[in-house]
Image (cartoon, rainbow, N blue to C red):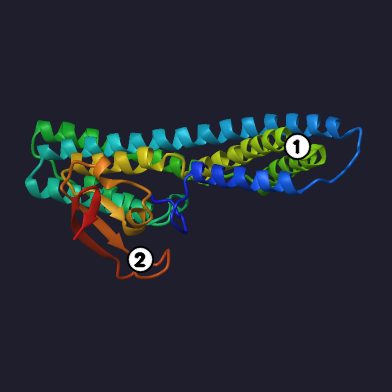
């Protein structure tokens, strides 16, 4: 369920500051001396279309993100329900179910969210088959078993919906249309620039605002938007509810994408190291480390 980020994540604020500096330098140094009477009309049309399309696109992508969040939290609730119901059975059955749930969650975390359906169906099938084959001995267990079967069937539907929403990404033409309109608007800014202090500052701020919309759209589309709050925090809580140590990929810690101490009350966590390039999980190593001063240390 992790999100693939090839290097240390740069915050939107840092990107915005860099963009503003670059824009100021461009408008300060560059003047096209274009005297098109219709440049203002082009700017009006392109800015209107760009604003309209990107607003709709961000709203659409944010709805997708919200739906993925909701489905993940539904999954958490179903898994917890199965875990609590398993306590009506023997200790060995309860522990084995917890182990199967742990393996399924670890598999989801090991793979990028976009690859949700690579290995997860196998783990889900194992969980389903085990629940289906549980032998019941009394009325309480019969009731619990029926509820667990209903829960696992619900989980199958949740996973189908998740797989669809994760793969429902923006098309290339959508990105191209936005980039073209944004580029035309930026060109019009340059054409209107007279290199006065007021012109440089105002146009650079408008340029940064356009860039900010692209930064936000990219993070929402790639599911990086507030990932600490909607992925890692709830996952850490879920592991704790299941009486398991929270599990994190090593790169999530190394790239400072989360502050573990803010996400879990556990004194120890599990860290996964992957010796081979993604998606090769061969020889994966899981270490148990303690948390100290917000940073994991062995």
Residue 65: horizontal and vertical position, in percent? 48, 37
Residue 60: horizontal and vertical position, in percent? 57, 33
Q: Is residue 123 something one can see in this rendering?
A: yes
Instruction: Find numbered disc 2 in the image and state the secondary structure of the residue it sits on.
Output: loop
* Residue displayed at 62% across by 41% down: 211
Please tell me which of labels 2 and 1 falls first in the chain.
1
Which residue was labeled with disc 2?
281
For residue 90, what is the image quadrant? Answer: top left
Q: CA distance from mark 2 to mark 1?
A: 57 Å
For residue 112, what is the image quadrant? Answer: bottom left
Using the image as rendered, state which of residue 33 and residue 95 is in the foreground.
Answer: 33
Using the image as rendered, state which of residue 285 and residue 12 is in the foreground.
Answer: 12
* Residue displayed at 28% across by 34% down: 77
Instruction: Find numbered disc 1 in the image and state the secondary structure of the residue it sits on.
Output: loop
For residue 169, what is the image quadrant? Answer: top right
Which residue was labeled with disc 1?
196
Q: Is residue 263 something one can see in this rendering?
A: no
Mark 2 neighbour class, 10 Å CA radius: few under 14, some 14 to 19, many 20 or more: some
Is 218 located above or below residue 55 in the figure?
below
Query: CB atoms at circles 2 and 1 under 8 Å apart?
Result: no
Using the image as rendered, state which of residue 173 and residue 81 is in the foreground.
Answer: 173
């Amino acid at each position: 369920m992790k999100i693939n980020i090839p290097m240390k994540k740069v915050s939107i604020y840092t990107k915005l500051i860099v963009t503003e500096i670059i824009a100021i330098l461009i408008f300060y140094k560059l003047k096209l001396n274009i005297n098109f009477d219709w440049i203002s009309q082009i700017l009006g049309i392109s800015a209107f279309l760009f604003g309209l399309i990107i607003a709709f696109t961000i709203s659409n992508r944010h709805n997708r993100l919200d739906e993925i969040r909701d489905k993940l939290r539904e999954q958490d609730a179903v898994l917890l329900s199965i875990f609590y119901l398993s306590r009506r059975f023997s200790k060995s059955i309860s522990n084995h179910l917890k182990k199967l749930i742990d393996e399924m969650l670890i598999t989801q975390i090991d793979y990028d969210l976009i690859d949700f359906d690579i290995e997860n169906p196998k783990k889900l099938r194992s969980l389903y088959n085990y629940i289906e084959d549980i032998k019941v001995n009394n009325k309480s267990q019969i009731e619990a078993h029926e509820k667990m079967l209903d829960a696992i069937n619900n989980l199958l539907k949740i996973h189908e919906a998740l797989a669809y929403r994760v793969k429902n990404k923006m098309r290339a033409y959508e990105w191209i249309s936005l980039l073209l309109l944004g580029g035309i608007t930026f060109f019009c800014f340059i054409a209107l620039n007279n290199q006065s202090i007021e012109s440089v500052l105002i146009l650079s701020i408008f340029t940064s605002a356009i860039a900010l919309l692209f930064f936000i759209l990219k993070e929402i589309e790639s599911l990086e938007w507030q990932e600490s709050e909607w992925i890692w925090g709830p996952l850490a809580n879920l592991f704790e509810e299941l009486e398991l140590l929270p599990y994190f990929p090593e790169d999530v810690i190394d790239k400072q994408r989360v502050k573990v101490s803010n996400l879990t009350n556990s004194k120890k966590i599990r860290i996964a190291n992957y010796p081979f390039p993604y998606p090769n999980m061969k020889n994966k190593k899981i270490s148990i480390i303690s948390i100290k001063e917000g940073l994991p240390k062995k």
